[in-house]
Amino acid sequence: MPVRTSDVLADLLNNLAVQEGTQPSAMNGVHLVRHSKPQAREPYVYEPSIIFVGQGRKIGYLGEDVYTYDARNYLVLSVPLPLECEVIAAPKKPLLAVTLQVNPTALAELLVEMDEGMPVSAEMPRAMYSAPLTQELRASVIRLLECLQSPLDGRVLGPSVVREIIYRVLCGERGGALRGLAARHSQFGQISRVLRRIHAEYPQAFDVETMAHEANMSLTTFHHKFKSVTSVSPLQYLKSIRLHKARLLMAHDGMNANTAATKVGYESPSQFSREFKRFFGRSPLEEAERVKETLRLAVPRPSVTIRARWPSLRDDPGDGSLARRR
């Protein structure tokens, strides 16, 4: 049987990702991505996820570290993470990708079943890493995309293929971040729990002392471990989450800057406007209008028919669950 190449990934994704930006698939927790134009380096918030690219390239910037993910390398994010991202794509060769959300509970259940009892490393893993796409992992991703050609196959067969993909990522030499995420009493697991709380309760008042207490760490240790995972301080992380959420409220829900600022936890509209412009490089109004225009341009494209053994999936437009289209 001939060995399949990454071109198969691109063909399948081209048939499934039928509109610009991020879109849902036939399976919960799996999203498809298409970008037909290059995008300059911009701030985003990524949910815990595993991202496989069939065509094109993305570059992620986290602090001083740079991560490239393309047809040869996949990306893993084990916690909600603000970072900057750049897209390398062209109209005739769009970026095509599939994203799998990471569920800590399902992850823990899978680890329990792994007979090896894979230990969590004593070292604090980074929350984000890229790794080479092995032949076995590529074959699993191809099977998932083939399942997604049919909504019924996606619902019935897809979960077992996703489980296989996560298993192979866990077994990889850099799977420590996902293993640490599932280990509730590890330092990484404690930091990830704080991150999830910030992500869910960002409008509330937070102080670093309370965060450190929740992570069962001293203030100094918490600061050090938090920054080793996210590359930013706890308060910088909180600020970036609030600013991203405010942008979504303005662009998607039509809120004005003052209302959005209050919704995400700012008491001073002027402070919000200053920090927003410093972070995004545009005023709240300018950025909201830019995002609205981008969403207006993200219209569905006609489905493309490829090889007969891969039936077409009907276009199912809708908003993805990611905090920002990728």
Image (cartoon, grey):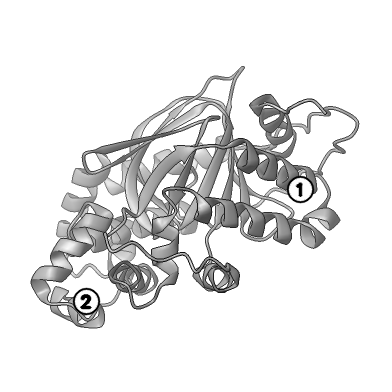
- Which residue of the protein is positioned furthest toward the left in this rendering? 220
- Crowding near the residue tagged with mark 2, few <14, some 14–19, many ≥20 C-alpha atoms within 10 Å: many
Is residue 322 among what the camera can see? no
| Whether residue 120 is situated above or below residue 141 in the rendered picture | below
- Check disc 1: other Cα within 10 Å, few if <14, some if 14-19, many if 20+: many
Residue at 25% across, 82% down? 214
Task: From the viewer's side, name the closer residue of 277 and 137.
Answer: 137
How far from the left and from the top, in percent, is residue 62? 28, 44
Foreground: 51 or 304?
51
- Mark 2 lies on a secondary structure that is helix
Where residue 217 appears, x then y in whole percent?
18, 77
Q: Residue furthest top?
A: 92
Q: Is residue 309 left or right of residue 220?
A: right
Left/right of residue 228 with respect to residue 311 in the rendered view? left
Amino acid at the residue labelled 1: Leu
Residue holding disc 2: 211
- Whether residue 50 is visible, yes or no, is yes
From the viewer's perspective, is 160 left or right of 30?
right
Image quarter in which the N terminus is found: top right
Q: Earlier in the sequence, mark 2 or mark 1?
A: 1
Query: Is 76 placed above or below 197 here?
Result: above
Cα distance between the residues tagged 2 and 1: 40 Å
Horizontal side of 19 relative to 154 (left or right) equals left
Q: Name the residue that disc number 1 marks.
A: 148
Q: Residue at x 37, y 59 (%)?
A: 245
